[in-house]
Image: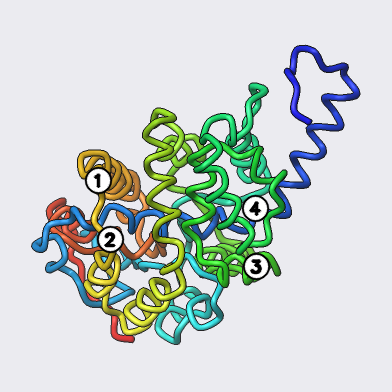
Amino acid sequence: MVGFPWKYSRSQKLVETATMTRQFNRYARPSILAAALFFSTLGFLAAPASAREPYSQGRLWMVEAADAAPSYLVGTMHSADPAIATPWPALAQVMDRVDSVTVELVMDDAVMATMGQAMMLNDGRTLGDIAGPERMARIQAVGAVYGFPPEALQRFRPWAASMIFSVPPSEMRRQATGAPILDNVLRLHAEGRGIPVYGIETVEEQLGLFADYSEADQLTMLDMTLEMQPQAEAQINELRKAWLAGDIGGLYDAAMDLPPTDSPELMDTFITRLIQERNYRMAERITGLLDQGNALIAVGALHLPGEEGLLALLEQAGYLVSPVGE
């Protein structure tokens, strides 16, 4: 039963906090690392064809600054599939010789706790109160595919439910076992070598990509995620094939194979914030590392290609970029 926080005794609050934490660790935590790539595909129906052409081939790129050792930029796929999370030989060699590793966000326990708190409703309402009976029935039906009991789903904000259901069930199961994604493999290897690990963004910035929308817009995006969920496994298989082949342009093609949306303006805004605006932010923030040289920087592969992609922005800023053979 959900009540109002200001009526709880201190012990009741502690019990509820512990319950929320257990629910988060069991059901939500495995999905967070994977959600960015899969959720980002929602808006690619609006991506212009020309955005897929430049820098569309290659997962690993050398980035050279004047008077500095070469650095490397790798486009990752946020999946714990061993075929994806295992570094290939060229990347493994780079991992062993760089002086630092940078990822989008360092997913430590503090960051995960912040995300968990942000994903949960805390104002006495349930997801069913916000979504309404008919939509909530659909949410529970999809949640059952993932193994969510109905009561666990009631605690999530609409954007959090979208984030979770954008991850295919097979990926959720892999991450629930503790299997790492490639970004974490890079981070853990760097920590084992004793070299610095940096994050490009803050947890607040990444949460804002989803949480800053009105509840009405969050529900619209949740509806889209629910509609696409039956195709989630086929979608991830297409993305997997393209990424393993180094075909980043193919990732765009697979991401565009989606049903039409009734809210194109919302999706245009979403994709601009999720991809293009972050590309500019990332380009600005990694220049110091590139100027120092011998850095490895890992971002989601969809940030690399296109006229406003990270590689194009770095080249425009005076860096020399070139693909590293597989």
> Is 102 above or below relative to 161?
below
Q: Give above or below for 213 relative to 160.
A: above
Q: Earlier in the sequence, mark 1 or mark 3?
A: 3
Q: Which residue is mark 4?
A: 29
Q: Which is more N-terminal, label 4 or label 3?
A: 4
Between marks 1 and 2, how big is the CA–CA gap?
10 Å
Front-lying residue, 59 or 319: 59
Label 3 and label 2: CA atoms lie apart by 44 Å
Quadrant location of residue 82?
bottom right
Residue 325 in the figure: left or right of residue 194: left
Quarter of the picture holding the C terminus: bottom left
Q: Residue 107, can we see it?
A: yes
Q: Nearer the viewer, mark 4 or mark 1?
A: 1
Spatial CA distance of label 1 from label 3 is: 48 Å
The image position of residue 126, as x and y in percent, is 63, 32
Q: How would you rate the neighbour count of disc 3 (Cα within 10 Å): few for under 14, some for 14-19, many for 20 or more?
A: few
Q: Quick one: quadrant of the N terminus? A: top right
Mark carried by residue 259: 2
Mark 3 lies on residue: 192
